[in-house]
Amino acid sequence: MSEKSVAIITGASRGLGLALTKAFAAAGWRVVVDGRDAGLLDAAVADLDGVTAVPGDVTQPGHQAELVRAATALGTVRLLVNNAGILGPSPQPPVAAYPADALRQVLEANLLAPWTLTQLALPALRTNGGAVVNVTSDAAVEPYVGWGAYGAAKAALEHASAILAAEEPAVRVWWVDPGDLRTRMHQEAFPDEDISDRPLPESVAPAFVRLVERRPASGRYRAAELSEVPA
């Protein structure tokens, strides 16, 4: 991988986004990352070589444009990882009682933001034979009680990913379920449970790097299965 290949990874202040940032930087990528809390983001990536922090809210069009500009200035944009997202209220209410305003926020963060950021990055990704990774969840395909808004948003993102893959043959599009991980979002989903038995995000980050390096067909993948992706 050329040292001037650039990846954009959203939601990199902590959790899976930060683990992915570390993994891709270690693999020789230049990485542009974002997060809503500027102080937290800067502290998280301060010691990482080749990582550029662009704090901001990924749902905002101006910030999305800033991310793409920053990545383009660094080199050849070959990867967009749409990782940023929100769970919604915790504990999660049932569909019958889900607040409409919270539903809009969940859909905007988990569906609309990756959709519109992808639109901005697509010209570069087409030209450079790049790829889009949309981080999804088993909640997109399983009807978990209380996961109505988040699951619906991720299900929509998965279907949009499949359509994007059909429409953009020059770009690889992968939607990846990382599995249950020991993250703050997962703890918020189960506020009264001990989730210390879940694996850390760092355990699955190498699988994402492997996926991008091997470039299999566009489609849905589970991180646990990516060791089986053919070279």
Image: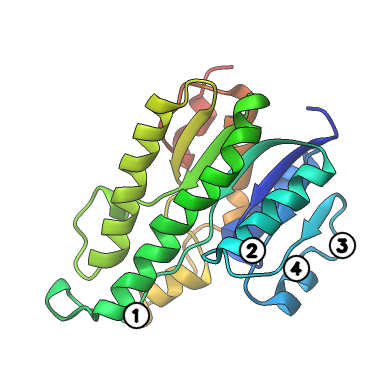
What residue is shown at x 75% (from left), y 40% (from top)?
6
State the SS at label 1. Answer: loop
User: Does the residue at mark 3 contact the one at mark 1 (Cβ under 8 Å)?
Assistant: no
Amino acid tagged 1? Pro
In the rendered image, which residue does mark 1 sit on?
A: 89
How far apart, in angstroms, are the residues tagged by discs 4 and 3?
8 Å
User: Does the residue at mark 1 contact the one at mark 4 (Cβ under 8 Å)?
Assistant: no
Which marked residue is nearer to the observer: mark 4 or mark 2?
2
Spot occupied by residue 179 in the image (x, y as percentages of width and height): 43, 51
- Mark 4 nearby-residue class (10 Å; few <14, some 14–19, many ≥20): some
**Quarter of the C terminus within the rendering:** top right
N-term mark: 2 or 1: 2
The extreme top residue here reads 231
State the SS at label 4. Answer: helix
| Marking on residue 44 | 4
Amino acid tagged 2? His
In the rendered image, which residue does mark 3 sit on?
A: 47
**Quarter of the N terminus within the rendering:** top right
What residue is shown at x 53% (from left), y 30% (from top)?
227
How far apart, in angstroms, are the residues tagged by discs 1 and 4?
25 Å
| Marking on residue 63 | 2
How far apart, in angstroms, are the residues tagged by discs 2 and 1?
25 Å
State the SS at label 3. Answer: loop
Q: Is residue 123 left or right of residue 191?
A: right
- Mark 1 nearby-residue class (10 Å; few <14, some 14–19, many ≥20): some
What residue is shown at x 68% (from left), y 49% (from top)?
68
User: Does the residue at mark 2 contact the one at mark 3 (Cβ under 8 Å)?
Assistant: no
How far apart, in angstroms, are the residues tagged by discs 3 and 1?
33 Å
